[in-house]
């Protein structure tokens, strides 16, 4: 597959897009039903279905109901009583226990996938097969091969796929990004990010959760790439357990409740990430960027600005927001609006499947680094994927690849073009 993609690149002279963007393939985009309906003035709103009515599904339903011109029309959950409760809470007219009822509903324009991670890949593929645009909470899949397959399924079907990485839409982090783009602090030298939860999750949550890098640090790793504005080179990660000693019996990075990473980017830019599952002073989410002419940093977000001044204490009257559900309420609404605007206006989504793939690669590389106590190149992780075709991929040891197969060194070699890249190429071809 790699050779054919490179050949097409040479023949078509198409430049790749920065940020793990794909090489150009042969997919033909289909015009979305939503766009046609809007152009025909038959639809004024984006009609969505939501799969999963657990904690994160409820968060997204809340965001959807706050977004203008977005209407949830059906929700699903295996425990149908949860779907019914969510439908009642948010005024959704239909509920079901079967996710396929959402995916095949003819009135649904886009599907929000908020189910457990192990179901994401197959549900994304089913959405693509039924011509539905997809918003999927991270991760897109639980392993790299399934992630590539899910992205390619959407690209092959000509539907849009957005990865839910809500911190990119938080006004504090976006202000830091703006400062970098506007050179307010000069050229970036160093990026620092921290995430510390108020209290550790239960043992049952940690077990099978993929480890601290994939489950927790993935947001910070993605944010480092977002702020750096380029693709990472390699990573060094370490982990330890300080809070809940019961998890030390678990495998891999699931046994860590504390971890740190150093990520190297082009031009000598360094990113440092630290995460911990417990912070005695509240939910700690901060970013700092040092440039060659200044620095920009964010503080934690508080429910109010009140301060107390006393003999023995001066400071905020209350603790920071206690968890991501309250801390990132505005970000969830903003990402919902951004996705729906891309559907209505037929523009690229702001956080793509490629971004989700890159975040997973970074988390897997961090896991490998902590386990093997060494720097790990992101190319090492990418090279483990073998695809017999874009929709059939697997993870293989290097000595098990078919004879003559050359492993990919860049994720873009694994992905066929998405609907917007195909459209842009078609426009350029027409102009030329």
Image: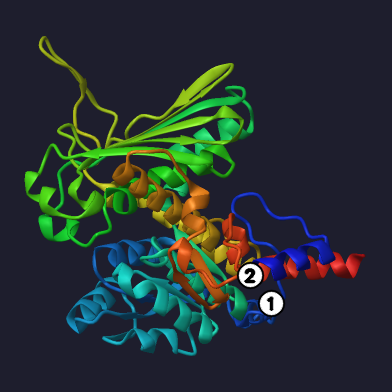
Question: Is 342 displayed left or right of 84 in the figure?
Answer: right
> Mark 2 highlights which residue?
416
Residue 37 vs residue 209, the one in the foreground = 209
Mark nearer the N terminus (1 vs 2)? 1
| Image location (x, y in percent) of residue 372 | 32, 44
Query: Element type at marker 2?
Result: loop
Q: Residue furthest left?
A: 246
Residue at 57%, 62% in the rendered image: 407
Q: Furthest residue to the right? A: 432
Q: Is residue 24 visible?
A: no
- What x and y, as percent, mark residue 71? 44, 74
Horizontal side of residue 316 vs 401, given as left or right: left
In the rendered image, the vertical position of residue 300 relative to residue 2, given as above or below = above
Give the total of numbered labels.
Answer: 2
Tell me the residue that label 1 is attached to.
27
- Please tell me how crowded label 1 is: few (under 14), some (14-19), or many (20+) other residues with Cα within 10 Å: some
- Quadrant the C terminus occupies: bottom right
Q: Is residue 99 above or below residue 152?
A: below
Task: Mark 1 and mark 2 in contact? Answer it, CB < 8 Å.
Answer: yes
| CA gap, disc 1 and disc 2 | 7 Å
The picture places residue 158, in percent across and down from the top left corner, at 62, 77
Instruction: Judge from the rendering whether residue 202 lies leftward or rightward of residue 190; answer left or right.
Output: left
Q: Quadrant of residue 172?
A: top left
Pick the quarter of the image with the N terminus.
Answer: bottom right
At 59% from the left and 69% from the top, the residue drawn is 343
- Tag 1, which secondary structure? loop
């Amino acid at each position: 597959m790699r050779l054919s993609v490179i050949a097409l690149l040479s023949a078509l002279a198409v430049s790749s897009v920065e940020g793990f963007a794909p090489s150009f393939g042969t997919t033909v985009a289909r015009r979305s039903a939503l766009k046609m309906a809007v152009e025909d003035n038959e639809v004024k709103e984006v009609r969505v279905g939501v799969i999963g009515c657990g904690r994160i599904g409820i968060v997204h339903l809340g965001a959807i109901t706050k977004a203008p011109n977005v209407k949830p029309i059906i929700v699903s959950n295996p425990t149908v009583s949860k779907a019914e409760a969510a439908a009642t809470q948010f005024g959704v007219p239909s509920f079901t226990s079967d996710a396929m009822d959402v995916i095949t509903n003819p009135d649904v324009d886009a599907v929000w996938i908020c189910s457990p991670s192990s179901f994401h890949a197959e549900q994304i593929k089913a959405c693509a097969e039924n011509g539905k645009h997809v918003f999927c909470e991270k991760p897109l899949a639980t392993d790299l091969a399934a992630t590539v397959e899910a992205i390619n399924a959407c690209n092959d079907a000509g539907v849009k796929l957005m990865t839910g990485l809500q911190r990119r839409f938080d006004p504090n982090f976006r202000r830091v990004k703006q400062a970098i783009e506007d050179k307010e602090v000069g050229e970036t030298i160093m990026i620092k990010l921290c995430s510390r939860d108020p209290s550790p999750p239960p043992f049952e949550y940690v077990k099978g959760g993929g480890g601290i890098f994939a489950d927790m640090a993935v947001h910070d790793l993605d944010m480092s790439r977002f702020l750096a504005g380029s693709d990472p080179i390699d990573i060094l990660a370490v982990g330890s357990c300080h809070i809940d000693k019961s998890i030390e019996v678990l495998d891999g990075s699931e046994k860590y409740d504390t971890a740190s990473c150093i990520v190297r980017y082009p031009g000598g830019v360094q990113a440092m990430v630290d995460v911990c599952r417990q912070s005695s002073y509240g939910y700690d989410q901060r970013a700092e960027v040092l440039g060659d002419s200044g620095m920009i940093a964010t503080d934690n977000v508080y429910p109010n600005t009140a301060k107390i001044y006393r003999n023995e204490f001066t400071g905020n009257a209350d603790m920071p927001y206690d968890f991501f559900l309250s801390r990132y309420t505005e970000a969830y609404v903003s990402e919902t609006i951004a996705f729906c605007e891309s559907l209505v206006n037929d523009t690229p989504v702001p956080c793509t499947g490629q971004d989700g793939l890159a975040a997973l690669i970074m988390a897997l590389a961090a896991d490998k680094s902590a386990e093997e106590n060494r720097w790990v190149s992101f190319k090492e992780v990418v090279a483990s994927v073998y695809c017999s075709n874009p929709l059939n991929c697997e993870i293989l040891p290097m000595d098990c690849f078919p004879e003559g197969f050359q492993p990919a060194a860049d994720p873009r070699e694994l992905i066929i073009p998405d609907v917007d890249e195909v459209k842009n190429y078609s426009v350029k071809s027409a102009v030329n």
